[in-house]
Image: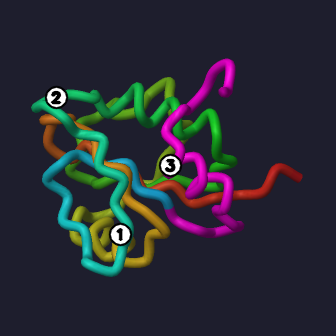
Amino acid sequence: MRPDGLWHPRLLQILSAAGHTDLIVVADPGLPVPPAVEVVDLVWLRGEPAFLPVLRAVLGELVVECAYIAEEAPAGFLDGVLTRPERIPHTQLKELTARARAVVRTGEATPYSNVVLQAGVPF
């Protein structure tokens, strides 16, 4: 048993297996996910779990080289959580999702609550 951090076994496996430049998406339940992309579906009720706590937990386990959010996301989205995520059109963000190693689906009901994380290296 881990003393802290993520406890979800499959999500831990995915994050620990991620290699440099692999993509991990933390998403709201409305983001379309192509059939070939694995989904770790955490949603159990509208709004639960919320996006930010899930994202913070993922960030605690993954070295992130860069992050992408939709241009349509509200100003200040992810301030204090990620430094300078790149804003791209939502259609392009959905295209990146097709290349993701996995999508972590939250219960967040706020539009455009999605982020694509590109794995980095710790050295």
Farthest right residue?
123
Pointer 2 residue: 47
Between disc 3 and disc 2, the foreground one is 3
For the point 27% across and 64% down, the residue is: 89
The x, y position of residue 16, in whole percent, is: 67, 53
Q: Pointers 3 and 2 in contact (CB under 8 A)?
A: no
What number of labels is visible? Answer: 3
Q: Residue at x 19, y 35 (%)?
A: 44
Q: Look at the image and give the residue range highlighted in magenta.
A: 1-23
Of mark 3 and mark 2, the one earlier in the sequence is 3
Q: Is residue 86 above or below residue 59?
A: below
Q: Residue 122 has which mark?
A: none
Other residues around mark 2 within 10 Å, as few (<14) / some (14–19) / many (≥20): some
Q: Amino acid type of disc 2?
A: Gly
Residue appearing at x 35%, y 69% in the figure: 97
The kind of secondary structure element at disc 2 is: loop
Viewer-closest of 93 and 59: 59
Distance in Å between CA atoms under marks 1 and 3: 17 Å
Q: Does the residue at mark 1 contact the one at mark 2 (Cβ under 8 Å)?
A: no
